[in-house]
Image (cartoon, rainbow, N blue to C red):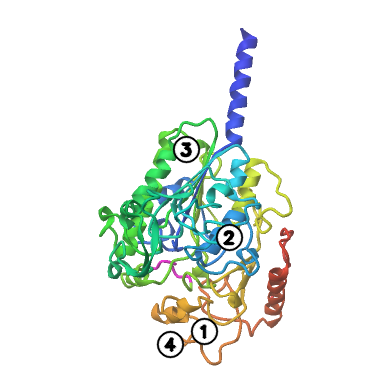
Amino acid sequence: MKNFVTFLTFVFATALIAQSSTPNVVLIYVDDLGYGDLSCYGATKVQTPNIDRLAEEGRSFLDAHSPSAVCTPSRYGVMTGEYPFRQGTGGSWGPLGHTRGLIVDTNKLTLGKLFHEAGYDTAAVGKWHLGFGKKKADFNKRLWPGPLELGFNYYFGLSSNNSANPYVYIENDRIYGWDPDDPLVERKGEGPLPYPFDEVGRMQTNRYEGATKAHELYDNRMTGTLFSEKAINWLRKEREKPFFLYFSPPQIHHPFTPHPRFVGTSQAGMYGDFIHELDWMVGEVLNVVDDLGKTDNTLVIFTSDNGGMFNLGGKQAWDLGHKQNGNLLGFKFGVWEGGHRVPFIARWPGKIDAGSSSHHLISSLDLMASFASLLGRDLKSEDAPDSINQLDTIVGDPSSAARDHVVLLPREEQNSGLRKGDWVYISSQGDGSGGIGTSQRGGPWAVAHTNSKNSDVAADGTIRSDAPKEQLYNLKTDPYQTTNVIWKHPKLATEMKVQLQTYRQSSATRIAGQFDIPNE
């Protein structure tokens, strides 16, 4: 009997160890959510109790960055663990057109493949924006290759976002509700939008007709509810394997179309109401994990693909007293901090200290190497070349940072930057938001409109005639980038410029070691 009890004890202990070594993972990768868009990061005009719960039960990172200040490049970086400038021949810099083919090489290791090859059930639900098809998406045919070829067992979502054609949902590799007798057809002229333009901000001209059932199933205002239902139903599947869910809500990218029950619930207009819907979506996923009894064995990561945008809804929210990127300089598309410093929260009860925070530098690029370490997988030299293992930073309490530098990528390549220690070098004037800046949605114009301060920007929102051609900031003494100090530290600026150029010119070589930072 004693031997039998000992045997049962051994089996039970072994099972616990096995369970702990194969935790479930939920990556919530949201759209356009800024550093100041959550109440746990200081917002007062919106309330995000479900996301705040993650912070209360886990760790908030205060120096976390997206791979780019633009959606598609960031998603490429997260999915592959490499900087988006390494994509293809010219890199990924802007939002991907809705008919573009898949931009991720199917031979590469991806997040989906990493977990799938480790024996996980895998799903991606939400915004994709990495393309479908070999060269061009044909929405009347099988959308192949796509998420399923990158390691996901299931996909449901949007080809790009709620503001873009063809205004249909996709399930696995087909249009959701597709009827071969009623194909999607490109219009010769403009068609009606699925939601009134003036109420919500920018939407693409509707270029498609036909696909009656698919279009009837599509409703901007129901997208959040539908995606939550799809994620919840997938989570509730009976399974023997651990699961990896990549949950990528299109919230809070324009158009701001929250479900009617959220309209008017914030003090920041439709922008804030959309944040409230996002918070509800996160709560729905967390509640299911709780109901399944898997909370203690599930690592949840929450972060955003770039900073908040100064679009129509963003301006309205700002005028109501809500600062989507807090006091950081800049917005989405730009290389200034507001474009890429984002919320990043990790929760794993019993492994991550509840209510803790970290000032260590971290990038979403690091998820690949960190998850590989979690799964006990050694990465090859060609796998995730720019990803650094930050597992100890996420679940432990290291005294020093694993990463001391990161390349900063805006919409315009010539404004690429380098963060190294406390210093930020930017290779041109302005923030590199390109046409977005000239159309009054960001850039120097927004600096003036928001009464922010930057020594290179004149009161009328233009670059001063005597401004330096490049930029250098010390975030330790000047966290909001008010003063360009490049003339005071020319040696440091030159060294960082050379390092940035070398980095960009290098092949996909795995990062090794850290740069030495001159004492200036």
Q: Secondary structure at mark 4?
A: loop
> Compared with residue 485, is residue 101 higher up or lower down, i.e. above or below?
above
Between the C-alphas of marks 3 and 4, the distance is 51 Å
Q: Which mark is residue 459?
A: 4
Q: Is residue 325 magenta?
A: yes
Between the C-alphas of marks 3 and 2, the distance is 34 Å
**Can the viewer see residue 295 in this picture?**
yes
Of the pair 275 and 414, the residue shown nearer to us: 414
Q: Position of residue 269 (x, y in %)?
A: 29, 65
Between the C-alphas of marks 1 and 2, the distance is 39 Å
Q: Which mark is residue 295?
A: 3
Q: Which mark is residue 455?
A: 1
Tell me which residue sits at (55%, 65%) in the image: 68
Q: Amino acid at mark 1?
A: Ser
Between the C-alphas of marks 4 and 2, the distance is 41 Å
Q: Amino acid at mark 2?
A: Ile
Write down the residue under mark 2. Answer: 103
Q: Earlier in the sequence, mark 3 or mark 4?
A: 3
**Residue placed furthest toward the bottom:** 465
The residue carrying pointer 1 sits among few (fewer than 14), some (14 to 19) or many (20 or more) residues within 10 Å by Cα, namely some
Q: Secondary structure at mark 2?
A: loop
